[in-house]
């Protein structure tokens, strides 16, 4: 691992990277840039936070990935659904939403009522699982989880994830109906994302406290649905022998248990973070 060469290359190529952290066996061994103070949008890393919240609720017996979606949708919204949509959502397990395997949804909910839009959107072939990356899947899980835990979902996440990880009151987004969005909208520092990765890499434990069960971490970060990127879990991406938390424009946390590594970086790269991944592999992973 040649961290100095890695950061020098970032500077030489003028990559718009905010900060980088590298941990080995849970200990910080390298840091560059602002990793502690400035918060930035984490985009779809928010989905991984929602997955952790789902796991906590699942551990407590409040919800299951095998439950049908409609079981947790408020009755007023169900009453506005067509009989065909009611039948569909009554047989669609939440696992299909967690794995982004519902065909037909557009990328995000639209209009003034996202829940009505999501529940009534006509689907092409809902019976056959196929990877289809859509924020609608995530939003429906967020609504279902809100009903399952019986409280505001942001409050639940704050009490059960952010506070135990020492993350103080991050910015977040709600839907027009007032639900925690779940798909995007949270802002964190590089170090705060690292804490998520460290907890997950340690079987759900952080500072001696079990945040979410090791069973759920294994399930959520394993390949549950194949895609062209190599596989997807419950809002986590497969990466080599481990997994990653991904947000657009280059918000990344790579967890590699075989090497005992957690590598986090945040950036603002319109062309994506492929170049950072290549440099990371060249200088931090493969050069060992």
Image (tube, grey):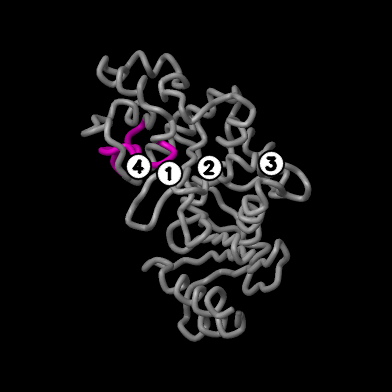
The earlier-in-sequence mark between 2 and 1 is: 2
The earlier-in-sequence mark between 3 and 1 is: 3
**Disc 2, SS:** helix
Residue 224 bears which disc, if any?
1
The residue that disc 4 covers is 108
Residue at position x 69%, y 41% from top?
Answer: 211
Residue at position x 28%, y 21% from top?
Answer: 85
Which mark lies nearer to you, 3 or 2? Answer: 2
The residue that disc 2 covers is 219
The residue that disc 3 covers is 211
Is there CB contact under 8 Å for labels 2 and 4?
no
State the separation of the CA atoms marked 2 and 4.
Answer: 26 Å
The earlier-in-sequence mark between 3 and 2 is: 3
Is there CB contact under 8 Å for labels 3 and 2?
no
Question: What's drawn in magenta, residue-wise?
Answer: 97-112
What is the chief secondary structure element of the magenta stretch? loop
**Disc 3, SS:** loop
């Amino acid at each position: 691992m040649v961290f100095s060469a890695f950061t020098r290359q970032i500077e030489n190529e003028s990559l718009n990277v905010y900060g980088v952290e590298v941990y080995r066996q849970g200990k910080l061994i390298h840091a560059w840039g602002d990793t502690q103070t400035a918060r930035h949008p984490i985009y779809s890393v928010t989905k991984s936070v929602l997955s952790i919240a789902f796991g906590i609720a699942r551990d407590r017996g409040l919800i299951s990935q095998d439950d049908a979606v409609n079981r947790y949708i408020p009755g007023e919204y169900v009453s506005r659904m067509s009989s065909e949509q009611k039948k569909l959502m009554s047989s669609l397990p939440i696992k299909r939403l967690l794995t982004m395997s519902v065909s037909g949804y557009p990328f995000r909910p639209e209009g003034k009522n996202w829940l009505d839009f999501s529940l009534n959107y006509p689907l092409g072939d809902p019976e056959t699982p196929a990877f289809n990356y859509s924020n609608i899947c995530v939003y429906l899980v967020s609504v279902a989880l809100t009903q399952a835990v019986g409280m505001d979902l942001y409050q639940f996440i704050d009490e059960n994830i952010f506070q135990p990880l020492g993350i103080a009151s991050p910015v977040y987004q709600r839907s027009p109906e007032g639900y925690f969005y779940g798909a995007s909208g949270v802002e964190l520092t590089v170090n705060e994302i690292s804490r998520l990765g460290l907890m997950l890499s340690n079987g759900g434990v952080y500072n001696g406290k079990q945040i979410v069960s090791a069973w759920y971490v294994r399930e959520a970060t394993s390949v549950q649905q194949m895609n062209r990127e190599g596989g997807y879990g419950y809002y986590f991406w497969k990466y080599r022998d481990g997994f990653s938390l991904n947000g657009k424009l280059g918000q990344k946390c790579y967890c590699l248990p075989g090497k005992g590594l957690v590598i986090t970086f945040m950036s603002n790269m319109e062309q994506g973070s492929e170049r950072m991944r290549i440099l990371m592999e060249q200088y931090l992973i493969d050069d060992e």
